[in-house]
Image: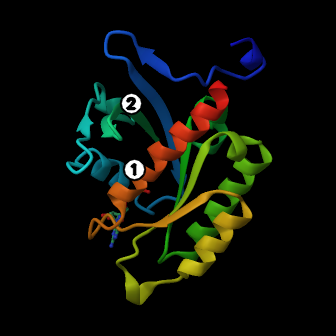
Amino acid sequence: AATRASAPCSLASSRDSSAGLSAYRVLVVGASGVGKSSLIGQFMTSEYLHAYDTSIDDESGERSVCVLLAGEESEITFLDSPPDNTVGEGCAHGYCVVYSTADRSSFLEAERRLQALWAGGHTARRAVILVGNKADLARSRAVNTDEGKTLATSYECKFIETSVGINHNVDELLVGLLTQIRLKQQHADR
Ligand code: GDP
Ligand code: MG
């Protein structure tokens, strides 16, 4: 714990002592209309992962889900698009930086967010995933898959294309996110 004293807040996962449950916070950021709220809503219904919604307060913009993955249950609380000036980046275990594959300006906004996370030193220590949503809108595609991959590689983060519309790769995103969070957390605990 002493080694983390200078951090803005502790990143140790909070554990519910009765259940032995790890709890993580994830910021979902990106331009308006790219599907952030839709993605979070879809996570809540992921039966494949035995995820279930544990949100208490719908007004707060926070949604929590319990996910059973690799025999271990974790609670993830998603914070939907906190404003730029209240990022609270030091307090999150993971980030989803979302753009729409049908909207180039949202891709540029995603690049700005990745740049800020990288410059702040967050990318090395936290799970960061670049998410190209709306992959179902093939005819209005404005950003190639390769451009997304290249951007993610240049900022040393993960990349996935999703579609909430046809439920493509949404479970995979949730699995990838939790897997990355657990890996980075193990590293931080050492
Ligand atoms: P937010 O502003 O980032 O929270 O975006 P929303 O979740 O409110 O979504 C904006 C609009 O995009 C809504 O009309 C959604 O139904 C739609 N949308 C979200 N995801 C997808 C997707 O994967 N494909 C398509 N075609 N539409 C989507
Ligand atoms: Mg929204």
Between 60 and 175, the residue placed more toward the observer is: 175
- State the image coordinates of residue 60 (x, y, percent, origin top left): 38, 30
Label ID, residue 60: 2
Label ID, residue 6: none
Residue occupying image coordinates x 59% and y 32%: 186
Circle 1: residue type: Leu
As helix, strand or loop, the secondary structure at mark 1 comes to helix
- State the image coordinates of residue 151 (x, y, percent, origin top left): 67, 69
**Other-residue count near label 2 (Cα within 10 Å), few / some / many at <14 / 14–19 / ≥20:** few
Q: Is residue 171 left or right of residue 102?
A: left
Name the image quarter holding residue 34: bottom left
Residue that numbered label 1 is attached to: 174
Decide if residue 76 is in sight here: yes
Residue pushed farthest bottom?
139
Decide if residue 143 is in sight here: no
Residue occupying image coordinates x 63% and y 44%: 84
Counting residues from the start of the chain, the first of labels 2 and 1 encountered is: 2
